[in-house]
Image (cartoon, rainbow, N blue to C red):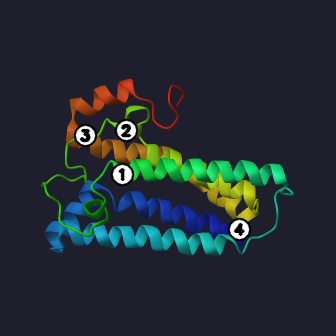
Amino acid sequence: MYFILIAAWLFYFFMHSFLADLKVKDFFYNSLSISHQAYRLLYNIFALGGLTALTIFSMRAADYTFQPSYLTFAIGCIMIAAGGRIMFLSAKAFDLPEFLGLKPFKESKTGAAEAGLIQTGLYRYVRHPLYSGTLLFSVGLFFIYPIIGLGIFLACMAVYIPVGIHSEEKKLIEEYGEEYLIYKKKVKSLIPGVL
């Protein structure tokens, strides 16, 4: 079961980046005549549905990696609250209905940002706060419920995040050019001043 779980998570993460690739999007837009809005909506349904299904599947591998305690529970709750807040503030920087595919893009850009490259809010401190928040939230969940299935999920996420960042930044460089390269030199990727 562990091998299946690892393969499923890696496949999910691969598809997450593959379907976000500009060439893949162009294929769907041009060859299959799918609108930007419809593609964004379908992509988000895949992302959320896949994440939910795999998380539930991961819970079946319920052997504990360590015995949880009140301390790990408290640490986990703090991390979940902080990660959730970071994710919320990250998403708030976008036009959320547009980002989710619930309304058409106002510009013909490939991204969902209406005002160009976002460098305000949490994006002032890290380039990928949504990844930071998701990672913090997930580690917190593992502290509360330290089962092998969630440990596998975290390990696969740790492998995926650098790949996801590379893929996303390739698109951002293509879209924003020199502006993004300057931003990339000034702002760390996941942890302010560190990484």
| 89 or 137: nearer the viewer | 89
Residue where numbered disc 1 is placed = 92
Q: Nearer the viewer, mark 3 or mark 4?
A: 3
Vertical placement of 51 versus 167: above or below? below
Tell me the CA gap for discs 1 and 2: 9 Å
Residue where numbered disc 2 is placed = 121
Q: Residue at x 28, y 64 (%)?
A: 97
Marks 3 and 4, the one that precedes in the sequence: 4
Tell me the CA gap for discs 3 and 1: 14 Å
Vertical placement of 179 versus 117: above or below? above
Tell me the CA gap for discs 2 and 3: 12 Å
Residue where numbered disc 4 is placed = 2
Q: Nearer the viewer, mark 2 or mark 3?
A: 2
Label 2 SS: helix
Q: Residue 23 placed where, x, y %?
A: 24, 57
Question: Where on the picture, by quarter, is residue 70?
Answer: bottom right
| 120 or 101: nearer the viewer | 120
The amino acid type of the residue labelled 1 equals: Lys
Tell me the CA gap for discs 1 and 4: 36 Å
Q: Say whether marks 1 and 4 touch (CB < 8 Å).
A: no
Q: Residue at x 68, y 53 (%)?
A: 77
Q: Residue 119 placed where, x, y %?
A: 31, 35
Tell me the CA gap for discs 4 and 2: 39 Å
117 displayed left or right of 140? left
The amino acid type of the residue labelled 4 equals: Tyr
Question: Where on the picture, by quarter, is residue 43?
Answer: bottom left
Q: Residue 14 placed where, x, y %?
A: 46, 60
Question: Where on the picture, by quarter, is residue 127?
Answer: top left
105 displayed left or right of 94? left
Label 1 SS: helix
41 displayed left or right of 190? left
Residue where numbered disc 3 is placed = 117
